[in-house]
Image: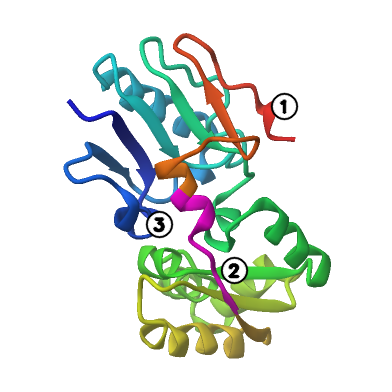
Amino acid sequence: MSDYYVITCATLIDEMQPFLPPDTPTRVMEFGWHRHPEQMVAALQEEIDRVPPGPTIILGYGLCGRGIHSLCAPHNRLVIPRVHDCIALFLGSQEAYQAQFRQAPGTYYLTKGWIESGDTPYTTYQRITEKYGQEKALRLAKLAIANYTRLALITTTNWDADRYRDFAKMVANVFDLRYEEIPGSPELVRQLVQGPWDERFVVLEPGESVDEMAFY
């Protein structure tokens, strides 16, 4: 039996894969649960309950709008990165995320996973065009991101940025956002998978429940 069992969001698995020991059991969850935190808690708890006793469960999620609140692994250690959402994981640390926030608080971030999942302002516009028509759909999509001034594509070494750069630039242009690229870092993801689990991680022993205050 493997020492680890991974439960992760689909947006993060490509970043985790290079660091996972061979044959590590992995459950990749569908993207988008963060929009429905109560349902996310239930879905993740169901997956945790399926893990056999023994292996440490590595959770590829942050706090995600309280989507992991109260999770408990009765028979396994549970390791969670001490971040509010996956952007910090792509950037390499919560500190890097906070530095970006101070520099440009109104930033809409894109990554390979977010683009492939179809969760962008442009795909939202496309989705509602049939119902409202192009002009109104675009107006509604722009209204939804009215507080953003910058679109930042986070790049990592695990994929070819050229495949996604044109799309990200197009989104920025359509929604009148300043476009920038930010080099990501694999460090926090690597440490999540390989350890050591220091203060940047919430480590729960079997039977302990997630307390959201541990993430602040």
Q: Which circle marks residue 213 in the picture?
A: 1
According to the picture, the residue beneath numbered tag 2 turns out to be 109
207 or 38: nearer the eye? Answer: 207
According to the picture, the residue beneath numbered tag 3 turns out to be 11
Q: Which circle marks residue 194 in the picture?
A: none
Q: Which residues are magenta?
A: 182-190
Q: Amino acid at mark 1?
A: Met
x and y, in percent, of residue 107 in the image:
70, 70
Q: Quadrant of the N terminus?
A: top left
- The quarter of the picture where residue 49 lies is top left
Q: Amino acid at mark 2?
A: Tyr
147 or 56: nearer the eye? Answer: 56
SS state under label 3? loop
x and y, in percent, of residue 204 in the image:
52, 20
Q: Earlier in the sequence, mark 1 or mark 3?
A: 3
Note whether 40 is above or below 164 in the view shown. Answer: above
Q: Is residue 156 left or right of residue 202?
A: left
Question: Alpha-carbon distance for marks 3 and 2?
Answer: 13 Å
Residue at 60% in and 85% down: 172
149 or 153: nearer the eye? Answer: 153
Q: Earlier in the sequence, mark 2 or mark 1?
A: 2
Mark 2 or 1, closer to the camera:
1
Q: Is residue 198 left or right of residue 17?
A: right
Q: Is residue 76 left or right of residue 178?
A: left
- The quarter of the picture where residue 27 lies is top left
Q: Earlier in the sequence, mark 3 or mark 2?
A: 3
Question: Alpha-carbon distance for marks 1 and 3?
Answer: 25 Å
Q: Is residue 108 left or right of residue 104?
A: left
143 or 13: nearer the eye? Answer: 13
Q: Amino acid at mark 3?
A: Thr
Specify whether residue 59 is painted magenta.
no
